[in-house]
Amino acid sequence: MDDKTRTELEAAAFRALVQHLRERTDVQNIELMNLAGFCRNCLSKWYLAAAEERGVPMDYDQAREIVYGMPYDEWKARHQREASAEELAAFAQTEAGRQQG
Protein backbone atom coordinates (compact mmCIF):
# COMPACT_ATOMS: atom_id res chain seq x y z
CA MET A 1 0.00 0.00 0.00
CA ASP A 2 1.36 3.42 -0.88
CA ASP A 3 1.72 6.18 1.73
CA LYS A 4 -1.05 8.35 0.27
CA THR A 5 -3.59 5.52 0.44
CA ARG A 6 -2.48 4.55 3.96
CA THR A 7 -2.87 8.16 5.12
CA GLU A 8 -6.32 8.40 3.53
CA LEU A 9 -7.44 5.18 5.23
CA GLU A 10 -6.06 6.28 8.58
CA ALA A 11 -7.81 9.64 8.23
CA ALA A 12 -11.10 7.91 7.39
CA ALA A 13 -10.75 5.62 10.41
CA PHE A 14 -10.00 8.61 12.65
CA ARG A 15 -13.05 10.49 11.36
CA ALA A 16 -15.21 7.41 12.00
CA LEU A 17 -13.86 7.11 15.56
CA VAL A 18 -14.50 10.79 16.27
CA GLN A 19 -18.03 10.55 14.86
CA HIS A 20 -18.69 7.45 16.94
CA LEU A 21 -17.54 9.23 20.11
CA ARG A 22 -19.68 12.27 19.26
CA GLU A 23 -22.72 9.99 18.97
CA ARG A 24 -21.93 8.03 22.14
CA THR A 25 -22.32 10.90 24.57
CA ASP A 26 -23.45 8.35 27.16
CA VAL A 27 -19.88 7.06 27.34
CA GLN A 28 -17.96 9.20 29.78
CA ASN A 29 -14.29 10.09 29.39
CA ILE A 30 -13.40 8.46 32.70
CA GLU A 31 -14.96 5.22 31.46
CA LEU A 32 -12.87 5.40 28.31
CA MET A 33 -9.73 6.10 30.35
CA ASN A 34 -10.41 3.23 32.72
CA LEU A 35 -11.15 0.73 29.96
CA ALA A 36 -9.00 1.86 27.04
CA GLY A 37 -6.39 4.18 28.49
CA PHE A 38 -7.43 7.15 26.35
CA CYS A 39 -10.39 9.49 26.01
CA ARG A 40 -11.71 12.36 23.92
CA ASN A 41 -9.26 14.74 25.60
CA CYS A 42 -6.36 12.45 24.66
CA LEU A 43 -7.51 12.48 21.03
CA SER A 44 -7.67 16.26 21.22
CA LYS A 45 -4.13 16.45 22.56
CA TRP A 46 -2.86 14.09 19.84
CA TYR A 47 -4.64 16.17 17.20
CA LEU A 48 -3.09 19.35 18.59
CA ALA A 49 0.37 17.77 18.68
CA ALA A 50 0.00 16.72 15.03
CA ALA A 51 -1.04 20.27 14.10
CA GLU A 52 1.90 21.76 15.98
CA GLU A 53 4.34 19.33 14.30
CA ARG A 54 3.10 20.59 10.94
CA GLY A 55 3.10 24.27 11.87
CA VAL A 56 -0.71 24.50 11.76
CA PRO A 57 -1.89 27.20 14.18
CA MET A 58 -4.28 25.69 16.70
CA ASP A 59 -4.88 25.71 20.44
CA TYR A 60 -6.21 23.02 22.76
CA ASP A 61 -9.74 24.44 22.80
CA GLN A 62 -9.88 24.33 19.00
CA ALA A 63 -8.62 20.74 18.98
CA ARG A 64 -11.21 19.72 21.56
CA GLU A 65 -13.98 21.34 19.53
CA ILE A 66 -12.91 19.25 16.53
CA VAL A 67 -13.14 16.05 18.59
CA TYR A 68 -16.23 16.91 20.63
CA GLY A 69 -18.12 18.55 17.77
CA MET A 70 -18.87 21.58 19.94
CA PRO A 71 -17.09 23.74 22.51
CA TYR A 72 -15.89 21.58 25.41
CA ASP A 73 -17.81 23.58 28.05
CA GLU A 74 -21.02 23.03 26.10
CA TRP A 75 -20.35 19.28 25.83
CA LYS A 76 -19.65 19.09 29.57
CA ALA A 77 -22.87 20.93 30.41
CA ARG A 78 -24.93 18.68 28.14
CA HIS A 79 -23.35 15.27 28.63
CA GLN A 80 -20.78 14.97 31.42
CA ARG A 81 -21.87 13.51 34.72
CA GLU A 82 -20.00 13.41 37.98
CA ALA A 83 -17.62 10.46 38.15
CA SER A 84 -18.47 7.85 40.75
CA ALA A 85 -16.13 7.02 43.62
CA GLU A 86 -15.50 3.64 41.99
CA GLU A 87 -14.57 5.24 38.66
CA LEU A 88 -12.21 7.69 40.35
CA ALA A 89 -10.56 4.89 42.35
CA ALA A 90 -10.10 2.77 39.21
CA PHE A 91 -8.61 5.77 37.41
CA ALA A 92 -6.19 6.48 40.25
CA GLN A 93 -5.10 2.84 40.32
CA THR A 94 -4.58 2.77 36.54
CA GLU A 95 -2.61 6.02 36.60
CA ALA A 96 -0.42 4.77 39.47
CA GLY A 97 0.33 1.62 37.48
CA ARG A 98 1.29 3.67 34.42
CA GLN A 99 3.67 5.83 36.43
CA GLN A 100 5.40 2.77 37.87
CA GLY A 101 5.61 0.98 34.51
Image: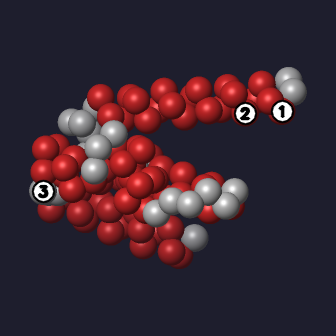
Q: Dividing the image into 4 quarters, which one contains the C terminus?
A: bottom right
Q: CA distance from mark 3 to mark 1?
A: 43 Å
What color scheme is it? secondary structure
Q: Are marks 1 and 2 in contact (CB under 8 Å)?
A: yes
Side of 69 relative to 49 (left or right): left
Identify residue for label 3.
82
Residue found at the far front of this picture: 57
Identify residue for label 2.
7
Q: Are marks 3 and 1 in contact (CB under 8 Å)?
A: no
Q: What kind of residue is marked 3? A: Glu
Q: Dividing the image into 4 quarters, which one contains the N terminus?
A: top right
Look at the image and tell me whether residue 35 can be seen.
no
Residue 87 location in percent, x, y? 23, 56
The answer to whether 53 is drawn above or below residue 34 in the figure is below
Q: Residue at x 34, y 43 (%)?
A: 68
Q: Secondary structure at mark 2?
A: helix
Q: What kind of residue is marked 2? A: Thr
Residue 73 location in percent, x, y? 21, 56
Q: Nearer the viewer, residue 64 or 25?
A: 64
Reading the chain from its start, which is encountered first: label 2 or label 3? 2
Side of 81 relative to 61 (left or right): left
Residue 89 location in percent, x, y? 25, 65
Q: CA distance from mark 2 to mark 3?
A: 37 Å
Identify residue for label 1.
3
Q: What kind of residue is marked 1? A: Asp
